[in-house]
Image: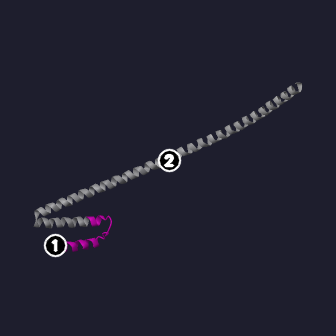
């Protein structure tokens, strides 16, 4: 009968304080904690051993919940720190990309200059070969004619 009364009072207080039915709700958590403490009190009156065991369960649950909260908060801090590091890294990466693109442009310009030089050297070599070839041909013709 006490449990039924306690349940009705809990439901009434949940509606009065507009506790959410699901998810994380501090109002609902507080009301359930108070109800569990009342259940422990009532169980302790009937059986002190059972009351002590329930208090132990309550304390263990609180410690686990506190550990989860601490873990959650540290993971949030870790996530924010990693996000800030990645944003900082993005700035450095952007700068590095710009430097590499500039170096690429300089190297492409150098390749173009070297290709022009190679073409000019090839052209001079062909012209010189043609001149040498024509000079040898004339010399061979002259020697044949003399011969």
Task: State the image coordinates of residue 27 (x, y, percent, origin top left).
Answer: 29, 66
Quarter containing the N terminus: bottom left
Residue for point 68% across, 39% down: 115
Task: State the image coordinates of residue 119 (x, y, percent, origin top left).
Answer: 72, 38
The correct choice, above or below, for 28 with respect to 130 in the image is: below
List the single residue furthest toward the top: 147
How many tags in the picture?
2
Give neighbour class at mark 2: few <14, some 14-19, many 20+ (Cα, 10 Å).
Answer: few
Mark nearer the N terminus (2 vs 1):
1
Quarter containing the C terminus: top right
Report which residue position mark 2 lands on.
91
Q: Nearer the viewer, residue 133 or 105?
A: 133
Q: Secondary structure at mark 2?
A: helix
Give neighbour class at mark 1: few <14, some 14-19, many 20+ (Cα, 10 Å).
Answer: few
Report which residue position mark 1 lands on.
2
Task: State the image coordinates of residue 94 (x, y, percent, origin top left).
Answer: 53, 47
């Amino acid at each position: 009968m006490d449990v039924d009364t306690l349940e009705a009072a809990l439901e009434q207080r949940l509606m009065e304080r507009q506790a959410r039915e699901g998810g994380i709700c501090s109002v609902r958590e507080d009301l359930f904690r108070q109800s569990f403490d009342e259940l422990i009190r009532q169980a302790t009156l009937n059986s002190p051993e059972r009351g002590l065991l329930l208090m132990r369960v309550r304390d263990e649950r609180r410690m686990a919940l506190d550990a989860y909260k601490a873990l959650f908060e540290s993971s949030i801090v870790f996530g924010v720190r990693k996000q800030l590091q990645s944003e900082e890294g993005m700035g450095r990466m952007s700068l590095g990309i710009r430097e590499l693109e500039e170096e690429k442009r300089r190297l492409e310009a150098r390749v173009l200059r070297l290709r022009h030089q190679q073409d000019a050297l090839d052209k001079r070599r062909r012209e010189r070969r043609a001149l040498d070839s024509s000079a040898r041909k004339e010399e061979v013709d002259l020697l044949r004619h003399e011969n």
